[in-house]
Amino acid sequence: MIPDLDPATDLSLTRILAAPRALIWECWTSPAHIPHFFIPAPHRVTAVDIDLRIGGRFNTTFDVEGQVMDNCGVFLEIVPGERLVFTDAYSEGWKPAPDPFMTALLLLSDAPGGGTVYTAIARHRNAESRQSHEEMGFHDGWGTVATQLETYAMTLMASRRG
């Protein structure tokens, strides 16, 4: 179920991915998989630290054109196979972030034919942050991530079959 969206503060992207929901969930919750899709190429994820529990860390480090970017956050809600909510408003131990950017909601459900209905929602604290994220390329960036996720998950499926 998609929560009510506030057009002033929320951005949303929904796609049908060919990979099954259990595999998409695995990709999002396993540190070994995150570097393969989590940021649009050619940028890279160089480190991932996940403690998959409410209040547990979801920390990533990116290399964006030679610049290192650390992103620290926590999980707010985990419904295995269905819903993953994380934010950069806090770091582990519920320490408030000085300048939080967003809360992300990932919603997964079964699509006809064995695929996954994949919805990513970015909730922002105000309209200005939302607008900034949209202008940074939310739809293109998160769309690229969804495509990379699908491609990577399909390679995992093929390697597991073979």
Image: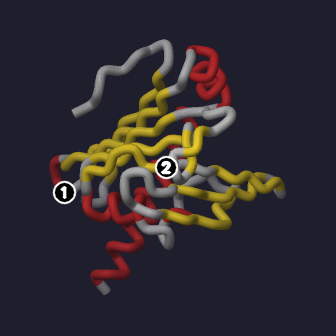
Please name whichever residue, 28 or 113, is drawn nearer the observer in this view of the structure: 28
How crowded is the residue under tag 1: few (<14 C-alpha within 10 Å), some, or many (20+)?
few
Quarter of image, res 12: top left
Q: Which amino acid does label 2 sit on?
A: Val
What residue would you read off at disc 1? 114
Q: Nearer the viewer, residue 110 or 49?
A: 49
Label 1: element kind = helix
Q: What element carries label 2?
A: strand
The residue lying furthest to the left in this view is: 112
Q: Residue at x 49, y 68 (%)?
A: 31
In front of the other: 63 or 125: 125
Residue marked by disc 2: 74
Query: Residue 159 occupies which quadrant of the picture?
Result: bottom left
Asked whether residue 147 appears in the rendered view, the answer is yes
Type of amino acid at the residue the image marks with label 1: Gly
Badge nearest the viewer, 1 or 2: 2
What quarter of the picture does the C terminus occupy? Answer: bottom left
